[in-house]
Image (spheres, grey):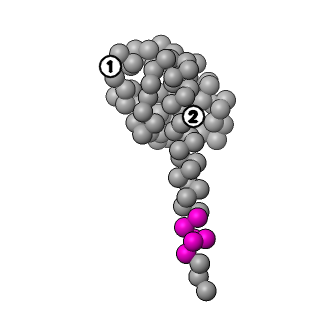
Amino acid sequence: MFNIGLYLEKFKKVGEKRNVFEHTVSEVFKNIASVDINPSSIKIFKGEMTVSAPPMAHSIIFMKREQIISELKEKLPNISIDRIRCC
């Protein structure tokens, strides 16, 4: 007989991985750039990270983008990030 609980368990793990990723990225921004980023405002597509942040944070993120990218590559080796874009 089909156990729906086991089937739904795999979707729970995907959500947990996403939460860990978002929390790690938010933590890196806070430690390096001293900017609080809402974890839900982070999107990654084809190596480009798009961050929704206040205008004051854009310049800080821009100045420290190399440090942020290197720290993210160190903490999240499975994720490829080449660029950070603020909007």
Front residue of 14 and 80? 14
Q: Residue 65: x, y in percent?
A: 51, 20
Percent x, y for residue 24?
A: 57, 34
Q: Quadrant of residue 76?
A: top right
Residue 72 point in image, percent of width and height? 60, 29
Q: Nearer the viewer, mark 2 or mark 1?
A: 2
The residue lying at 56 percent from left, 20 percent from top is: 31
The crowding category of the residue bearing disc 2, from other C-alpha atoms within 10 Å (few below 14, some 14 to 19, many at least 20), is some
Is 8 magenta? The answer is yes
**Residue for point 66% across, 37% down:** 77
Image quarter where the C terminus lies is top left
Q: Is most of the magenta stretch helix, strand or loop?
A: helix
Range covered by the magenta-colored residues: 4-9
SS state under label 2: helix
> The disc labelled 2 sits on which kind of residue?
Thr
Is the residue 63 above or below the residue 80 in the image?
above
Q: Is mark 1 on a helix, strand or loop?
A: helix
Q: Choose the circle earlier in sequence order: 2 or 1.
A: 2
Measured in 3D between alpha carbons, the distance from the residue under mark 2 to the one under mark 1, in whole angstroms, is 22 Å
Q: Where is residue 85 in the image (x, y as percent from the top left)?
A: 42, 27
Residue at the disc numbered 2 = 24
Amino acid type, label 1: Pro
Residue 72 visible? The answer is yes
Q: Name the residue under label 1.
A: 55
- Above-or-below relation of 73 to 6: above
Res 5 quadrant in image = bottom right
